[in-house]
Structure formats: structure tokens, C-alpha cells
Image (tube, rainbow, N blue to C red):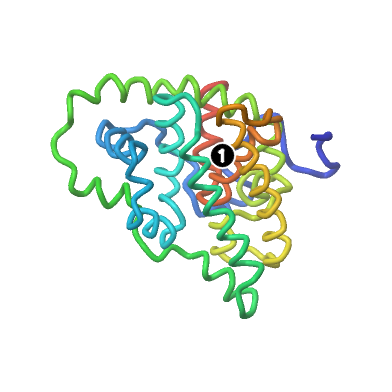
Amino acid sequence: MGGRPEGSKVTSWPTVAPAGDRSPLPGDVWLDATSAEVKQLWWFLDGAIQEPHVRQQLWRSWGLCSRHAWLHAVVETELRNQPFSTTILYEDLVSRAAATLEHSVGPAWARIRRLRSRGKCLTCSDLTLAGPPDPSFESRTWRVNRRARIGRLLGGAVTEWVLRSCPECLGGVGPLCRLHLLAGAPAEPRPVADALVELDARLRHFIKSMTWDGPTAGPEHHSSWIEALGWCGGWAYAAQLLQTQYC
């Protein structure tokens, strides 16, 4: 991708708190996962995401909550090396969001309102029923909380995704994230939908690149799954992670 557009607020490394404190997400993000979270997300990765009732719940809630959306990616990349399940899930959600904004009937505010969660985060719900800590997940929790691989993946693509981030979250030139759209930041649905259609194409390419004999993925494809997580759940976790890793 070309250089940074003139006038963009993007810096080399993202800041957690946006100008004016306009983000609906807290600036101080708790990065570490508990063993209960790792166990639930491991179960989620281990086939539960394919169950019809689980997928329907994810559609209603527009994925997991912000924290668990990012932790899902952390658990997958640390324990399974690449964000395959993460990308598949959020490609589906990005595609649905683009269709909602572009093709739904009604005024702009009504189309944006359809992006509201109509259900609880699946991980949050399951954790209310979690039992005592499972010793068999101690080593996996330690690996997850080292965040070695996710740090490299986010750091390696940082010039791509910071530029395309939400202007309200990180000062990028990308579309307003779902959370800021719902918080009332001024935006027309059509340009956001167009940006999501373009993102969806890059997500599809990246998914294919992770399969046998798939196409080569460029920097814009390696950035796509990060952008999808940021659009659906906000950018605070990614920004805090990079500050913790490198600053």
C-alpha cells in the first residue's frame, strides 16, 4: 500500500486513547486471559463454532464481545499458529454487515441500528458456568499470555492496519468501527458498506491463502483479519497489545 495520506493522524505506533476520549472502549485493556477463558475458547476453536445454534448466536451478537473477539484470535494464533477460524468467522460477519448497511430498507440510522448485538457474548455466557480452574490448561494459558506469535503478526502488519483503522479509535482513514457507528459518530452507511465489501474480498483471499496450494497473501491480506476484528469489536486491545510488546 502507498504512503500515509497527508493529514492522517496515524503515527508509527497506535495510541490507546483516541483524541477527545471518544471511544466507547476503556483505554486500559486487560490483556491476559484466564485459564477459564483459554479453556472455553479452545472448546470454541475445537469445532463448536461449526454448530448451527452457535453460529446463529454469533450472528445475533455480531461475534464475541470486544475482549473475547481478540482473545479468540490470541488463543488460536498461539496454540494453532494461524488465525484460520478467526478469519472465517469475521469474514462471515463483515459480509453480513456490508449487506445490512447496503441493502437494508430504511433510513441510515435504522440500518446502523441493525448492527446492534441482540444476544450475549457466547464466551461471557459460558464463563458464568465455569467450574474451578482446570490444571490441564495451565501450560496453554501460559503460552497464550506470552502473546509471542500474535505480537509478531500484529507488529508485522502494523503499517497496514493502523492506516485502515477506525478514525475515532486510532485516527486511521478506514471506516468507522461498528461500536462507533452505534455510539452515534456521524457516518453514511454506503461508504462504510463499500469499505467492508473491499475488506471482505481481502479476507476471502487470506482464507484461501491458508489452505493447501492457496494463493500468496500480500501485506493487505495479512492485515485483513486484524481490520475485521477492529471493525467488529474496536481497536483498544490491539493498540494496548502493541504498546505492551514494543513500548
Name above or below for residue 188 compared with residue 125.
Answer: below
56 and 193: which is toward the camera: 56
Callout 1 amino acid: Val
Q: Quadrant of residue 161?
A: top right
102 on left or right of 211 = right
Residue furthest out toward the left? 132
Left or right of residue 216, residue 122 in this image: left
Disc 1 designates what residue?
Answer: 16
Count residues near mark 1 (Cα–Cα under 10 Å), then give few for <14, some for 14-19, many for 20+: many
Q: Nearer the viewer, residue 225 or 187?
A: 225
Q: Total number of numbered labels?
A: 1
> Residue drawn 58% across and 67% down?
100
Q: Residue furthest bottom?
A: 106
SS at circle 1: loop
The residue that appears at 42% across and 43% down in the rendered structure is 67
Q: Is residue 15 above or below residue 114?
A: above
Residue in view at x 30 percent, y 49 percent = 124
What residue is drawn where x is 57% and y is 40%? 225
Q: Position of residue 156 (x, y in %)?
A: 63, 24
Q: Is residue 116 left or right of residue 6?
A: left
> In which image quadrant can residue 159 be found?
top right
Q: Where residue 108 appears, x then y in whole percent?
A: 64, 74
Residue in front for this viewpoint, 221 or 17: 221
Image quadrant occupied by the C terminus: top right
Q: Position of residue 165 (x, y in %)?
A: 65, 44
Quadrant location, the N terminus = top right
* Percent coordinates x, y for residue 190 in the rendering: 71, 66
- Give the farthest residue toward the front: 213
- Nearer-the-camera pick, 32 or 39: 39
